[in-house]
Image: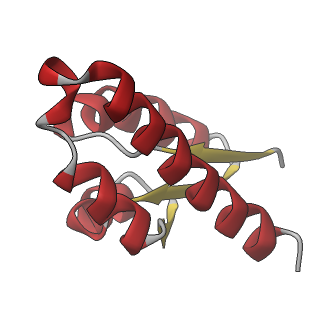
Amino acid sequence: MKKALYINIGGEGHLNPTLGLVHDLVQRGDNIVYYSSNDFEEKIKKAGAQFRPINQEAQRELSETMNLMTSHPQEYLLHFLHAMERITDSIFEETSK
């Protein structure tokens, strides 16, 4: 059995294309752990993966700063990178236990 880790911080347009592959991998017997927003927990579980919530504070920061993407892209990028660092740090901490 192989293991895979998915991390998806986007909306449904980012999540939905991954679910078929996740389902197929699970059907092959692979162990898939999928980090995403709580909004997508049921879809991820239905595909057969183990759902884990991403850092909600960082997700909230990303959502709150989306309007900066077009008006102030450099500022948005700084927020994005900061939030991603928090998300990945929390995932690494959890998965290394």
Quarter of the image for the C terminus: give it.
bottom right
Residue sitting farthest toward the bottom: 97
Is the image coloured rainbow, by chain, by secondary structure, or in one colour? Answer: secondary structure
Q: Is residue 4 left or right of residue 12?
A: right
Residue 10 seen in render: yes
Q: Residue at x 54, y 49 (%)?
A: 82
Nearer to me, 86 or 7: 86
Coordinates of residue 43 in the picture (x, y in percent): 26, 56
Q: Is residue 34 above or below residue 4?
A: below
Q: Residue at x 63, y 51 (%)?
A: 85
Report how many numbered discs are placed on residues in the image: 0
Q: Residue at x 66, y 54 (%)?
A: 88
Residue 46 seen in render: no
Nearer to me, 22 or 80: 80
Q: Is residue 66 left or right of residue 45?
A: left
Coordinates of residue 8 in the picture (x, y in percent): 44, 43
Coordinates of residue 32 in the picture (x, y in percent): 63, 52
Q: Is residue 33 above or below residue 13?
A: below
Picture quarter containing residue 95? bottom right
Q: Residue at x 29, y 21 (%)?
A: 73
Coordinates of residue 7 in the picture (x, y in percent): 53, 46
